Amino acid sequence: MMDTLQTIMTRRSVRHFTSQPVTDAELESLLRAAMQAPSSGNGQPWYFIVLTDHNIMDEVTKFHPTAAAIKEAPLAILICGDETLEGKPGRWMMDCAAASQNMLLAAHALGLGSVWLGIHPDPARIEGVSKLMGLPPQVHPLSIVAIGRAAATPEPVDRYKPERVKLNHW
């Protein structure tokens, strides 16, 4: 397994996958990592819907124009926030974003490829996912992470921009 900084610095979005499945142990590790994310007031307002049915996964591409990767992935995980579980009102998005990032990093550390498919705040994507999944009104979709064994892994990119760093004030 990679060390933390190596995992962060080398993770890339993967949009093409082999047909090899993700194991149950790997899936549990991904979900455990997501649930270890920090959350406001320790509310942990997240729910995760594991998608393995390609009929359902293919439906996502009908309302999400950049979700083609989901067609190749052996599984995807929808990350949702339940506003009734928020530790502090209005924070479910940040909490679920942290869970999504943990999941992406865990996938890379496990040797899997993954890509974040944003849902929130696009109204068509929110409506499409909510109807497709039958989400209750207090549960809001944030993202879908498509996961599998990478068919090809993009090279790491150094994104550090010192001009974006200010000291003490603007």
Image: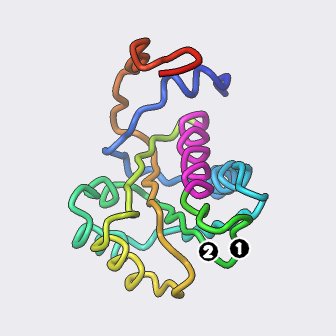
Q: Are marks 2 and 1 in contact (CB under 8 Å)?
A: yes
Residue 38, x across and y down, in percent: 72, 49
Residue at position x 54%, y 68% in the image: 80
Q: Magenta: predominant secondary structure element?
A: helix
Q: Hey, which quadrant is residue 44 in on the image?
A: bottom right
- Type of the residue with mark 1: Leu
**Measured along the vertical axis of the image, is residue 115 above or below residue 108?**
below
Residue at the outermost front position = 169
- Type of the residue with mark 2: Asp
Total numbered labels: 2
Residue at position x 47%, y 70% in the image: 141
Residue 160, x across and y down, in percent: 43, 17
Q: Start and end of the magenta stretch?
A: 94-110
Residue 126, x across and y down, in percent: 37, 73
Q: Is residue 97 magenta?
A: yes
Left or right, residue 167 beside residue 55:
right
**Element carrying mark 2:** strand
Left or right, residue 125 beside residue 120:
left
Q: Nearer the viewer, residue 23 or 1?
A: 1
Q: Hey, which quadrant is residue 151 in on the image?
A: top left
Residue at the outermost right position = 42
Q: Nearer the viewer, residue 18 or 131?
A: 131
Reading the image, the residue beneath label 2 is 82
**Measured along the vertical axis of the image, is residue 24 above or below residue 18?**
below
Residue at position x 57%, y 38% in the image: 105
Left or right, residue 168 beside residue 128:
right
**Measured along the vertical axis of the image, is residue 122 above or below residue 9?**
below
Reading the image, the residue beneath label 1 is 85
**Measured along the vertical axis of the image, is residue 70 above or below residue 135?**
above
Q: Residues within 10 Å of mark 2 (few under 14, many from 20)?
A: many
**Element carrying mark 1:** helix
